[in-house]
Amino acid sequence: MQTNFTAFQLEDPTVARADSIMRRCVHCGLCTATCPTYLILGDERDSPRGRIYLMKQLFEQGEVTPTITRHIDRCLSCLSCVTTCPSGVDYMHLVDMARARIESKARRPLSQRMMRWFLREVLPYRNRFRFVLALGWFARPFRGAFASLGMTRAASALALVPARVPRIKLRKVKDVIRTDERRVRRVALMLGCVQEVLQPSINRAAIRMLKRHGVDVVLVKEERCCGALSHHLGDEDAALASARHNVDAWTAAMRENPFDAILITASGCGTMVKDYGNLLARDRGYAERAREVSSLARDITEFIEELGMTTPLMWTSIKVAYHSACSLQHGQRVEIEPRALLAQAGFTVVEIPEGHICCGSAGTYNILQPELSGQLRDRKLANIATTAPDVVATGNIGCINQLKAGSPVPVVHTIELLDWATGGPAPAGLKRLESQIHPIQSLVEMASA
Ligand code: SF4
Ligand code: SF4
């Protein structure tokens, strides 16, 4: 793509980087076929190519128009276009830079500003989120009334409040959990913010799984939200502050006793932590340590696959539809490992048609863009239904919550199924499938009878 920046404009490192990314685009349009918003809206400005043109206008003219804001806001940052693009256009960092610029200059209506402020100030903080979730639980039955009053964003947010607020207390686990087996690795497990409140059972399953595999697990008390929520809302300062805080926390904890990996069970957070090295590349005090943290970051399934999973203790006929979260498949390119582990654990893994298309969760997208998000969820659920699964597995809490809100079958985290297969408890909602579980021992006995 031809750009027309002046030498003065290119002195700004952000503009120079945006320029080098945009110049790689050859307008081929292949990305439009895999862009969820283009598939739904059919408007070129809601496709990756169209958005790149809008971002060119944004950076060249330095002006934030309502049209630019509208179409960039509608982007899910699902990164499906990045996987598709044959020219290697780094759309992820381009749209991140555009969001930060829009956020610093756009004049948004008061209701939008209030909602964005609320999301930034509540979601990344476990105690605040827990408190708001409890309030939301009381308001949940009235979500229809909110919708009829035109408060669609509030109604959508309430629809995502789980029917039961989890009771497990935060930090009930120790800071260092030692394996009972011969120790082979020592890792930090990031508990995260939203997931640890909405579904603490995921990290508990990961801890059991790691202990069983000879891994000591360290929970670094000082860690906080990875920064992805602020980052996708365009609040660059808050996102970088979170990244620096976590780099400090993990590198300090590693000083005495290094980690073999920093594990993350929410793939949206994993994508962010893997990008710390890039985000802090120009920060002399952090660049090297941020690169080290990013090089240690692994999705939980990546790590278990590298380690080698123990033999499952059960045989089952349970059919699992694996939903590959965008942040895992497009953001981290972790595609084979979760499927391979589920199959190795004895589950029948089925592929969901249009598996590369986002479910509409995308961080806070389902609250900020409820109509589009709802259409994408319905499309995903219809695709899932064609596979007639017993359960849906995925690696991101955002997708779990989004799909749960309309799925007739349970939606769980991949690690919960792997934990169950190797000796852990049945994930919530799967009790009814226990008749489809047979201990391996009983099969051995049947074969020898
Ligand atoms: S990130 Fe997703 S929604 Fe945004 S332009 Fe790319 S494919 Fe479309
Ligand atoms: S596929 Fe890549 S090169 Fe082609 S239009 Fe899309 S972003 Fe540009």
Image (cartoon, grey):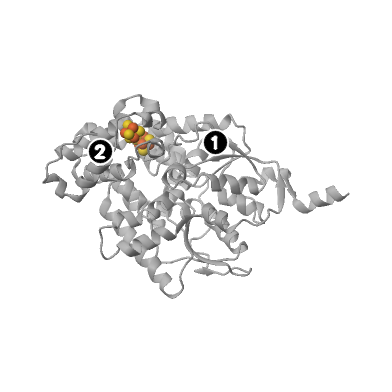
* 364 lies above or below 203: above
Image coordinates of residue 423 in percent, x first then y, are 67, 56
Q: Dot 1: what SS?
A: loop
Q: Dot 2: what SS?
A: loop
Distance CA(mark 1)–CA(mark 2): 42 Å
Q: Give the farthest residue toward the right.
A: 449
Q: Quadrant of the N terminus?
A: top left
**Which residue carries the number 1 mark?**
407
Q: Residue at x 49, y 47 (%)?
A: 334
Q: Give the farthest residue toward the top.
A: 42
> Tags 1 and 2 in contact by the CB under 8 Å rule?
no
Image coordinates of residue 234 in percent, x first then y, are 28, 46
**Which residue carries the number 2 mark?**
23
Quarter of the figure with residue 93: top left
Q: Nearer the viewer, residue 49 or 67?
A: 49
Identified by mark 2, the residue type is: Arg
- Name which of mark 1 and mark 2 comes first in the sequence: 2
Instruction: Classify mark 2 as within 8 Å of ligand 2 or not, answering yes or no.
Output: no
Density class for disc 1 (Cα within 10 Å; few <14, some 14-19, many ≥20) is: many
Image coordinates of residue 86 in percent, x first then y, are 38, 36
Does residue 189 appear in the picture of this structure? Answer: no
